[in-house]
Amino acid sequence: MLEETDDWDDDDLDADLSDDDGEPTVPCPYCGEEMLEDSPQCPTCGNYISAEQLPYYRQPMWVVVTAAICLILALGWLLRRW
């Protein structure tokens, strides 16, 4: 009678699928996918890992100027009525 041997090992499969290029990986706190430890942004979900690494964003100048003009007009209208 022939015996079937199971040469398949799940640990071998996991070892073959992992990116073992020597660089340490950690799970992303947002999506859970593995990412490089030194990476500022998750390559899977695109979220930045810390607030210090977020890109600097500021309002366009026309938004600031428009808000200032509206505030001045509103204050002038209120002060003129008194």
Image: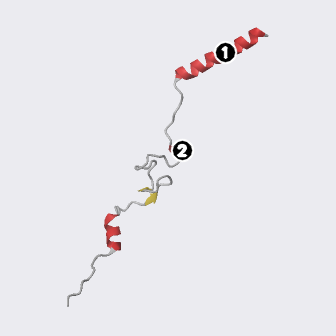
Amino acid on which disc 1 is placed: Ile
Quadrant assignment for the C terminus: top right
On the rendered structure, is 19 left or right of 77? left
In this picture the colour scheme is: secondary structure
Instruction: Identify whether 33 is placed above or below 41.
Output: below
Please tell me whether mark 1 sits on a helix, a strand or a loop: helix
Image quadrant of residue 19?
bottom left
Q: Position of residue 38 (x, y in %)?
A: 45, 53
Query: Among all residues in the image, which is located at the extreme front?
Result: 1
Q: Nearer the viewer, mark 2 or mark 1?
A: 1
Instruction: Identify whether 59 is placed above or below 15.
Output: above
Q: Position of residue 25 (x, y in %)?
A: 43, 59
On the rendered structure, is 28 left or right of 64? left
Residue depicted at 51% across the width and 25% down the height: 60
User: Which label is found at residue 48?
Assistant: none
Query: Among all residues in the image, which is located at the extreme top?
Result: 80
Amino acid on which disc 2 is placed: Glu
State which tag comes first along the sequence, 2 or 1. 2
Front position in the image: 19 or 4: 4
Residues at marks 2 and 1, CA–CA distance in whole angstroms: 35 Å
Quadrant assignment for the N terminus: bottom left
Query: Among all residues in the image, which is located at the extreme left?
Result: 1
Please tell me whether mark 2 sits on a helix, a strand or a loop: helix
Q: Position of residue 61 (x, y in %)?
A: 53, 22
On the rendered structure, is 77 left or right of 4? right
Q: Residues within 10 Å of mark 1 (few under 14, many from 20)?
A: few
Residue depicted at 51% across the width and 36% down the height: 56
Residue depicted at 60% across the width and 20% down the height: 67
Q: Which residue is mark 1?
A: 72
Q: Which residue is mark 2?
A: 52
Instruction: Identify whether 59 is placed above or below 27.
Output: above
